[in-house]
Image (cartoon, helix red, strand yellow):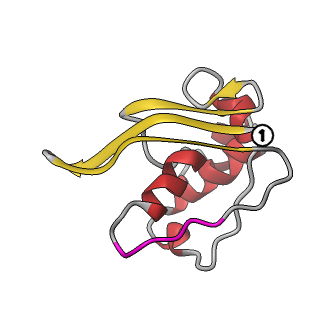
Amino acid sequence: MLQVSNLSFHYQPNVPVLTNLTFSVPDGEIVGLLGKNGVGKTTTLKLILGLLPIEKGTITLEKYSLDTHPLQYKKRINYVSDNHEIYNNLTGKEYLNFIADMYEVSTETRTKIYAPL
């Protein structure tokens, strides 16, 4: 089960995007986020995926919290985007580290492979 509890986030001071958002998604359920532009749908997904830092609240998947057990949490979540803009915003080294993180490549191995970057 995915559990989001009291999640809050803002991009600019005093301009909240999410305030105390709470919901759960049982295993096997399919859920859609619907709403007007700017209400926090994409921000919510980015927080759940660990692409934005959690300001307040908790996100857990199964028994793992994104805050306290990020690696175990991220091993259990998948996402397929309708666009790939994240890759356009990463440097070459950031992209390599992004992929290496998914496959748990050690720092030592990364240094051997792409130290000159």
Q: Which residue is mark 1?
A: 75
Whether 56 is drawn above or below 23: the answer is: above
Which residue does the image show at 44% across and 47% down from the upper left?
52
- Circle 1 packing at 10 Å, graded few (<14), some (14-19), many (20+), is few
Q: Quadrant of residue 4?
A: top right
Which residue lies most toward the bottom here? 83
Which residue does the image show at 43% across and 38% down from the upper left?
7
Q: Nearer the viewer, residue 96 or 4?
A: 4
Q: Quadrant of residue 87?
A: bottom right
**Is residue 36 one of those drawn in magenta?**
yes
Name the spot of residue 30 as percent of width and height, x first: 77, 61
Name the spot of residue 50 as percent of width and height, x first: 55, 44
Q: Is residue 109 left or right of residue 9?
A: right
The kind of residue on which mark 1 rests is Lys
Q: Is residue 29 left or right of residue 112?
A: right
- Highlighted magenta segment, given as a residue range: 32-37
Q: Nearer the viewer, residue 84 or 113?
A: 84
Q: Quadrant of residue 84?
A: bottom right
Q: Is residue 90 visible?
A: no
Which residue does the image show at 80% across and 55% down from the upper left?
29
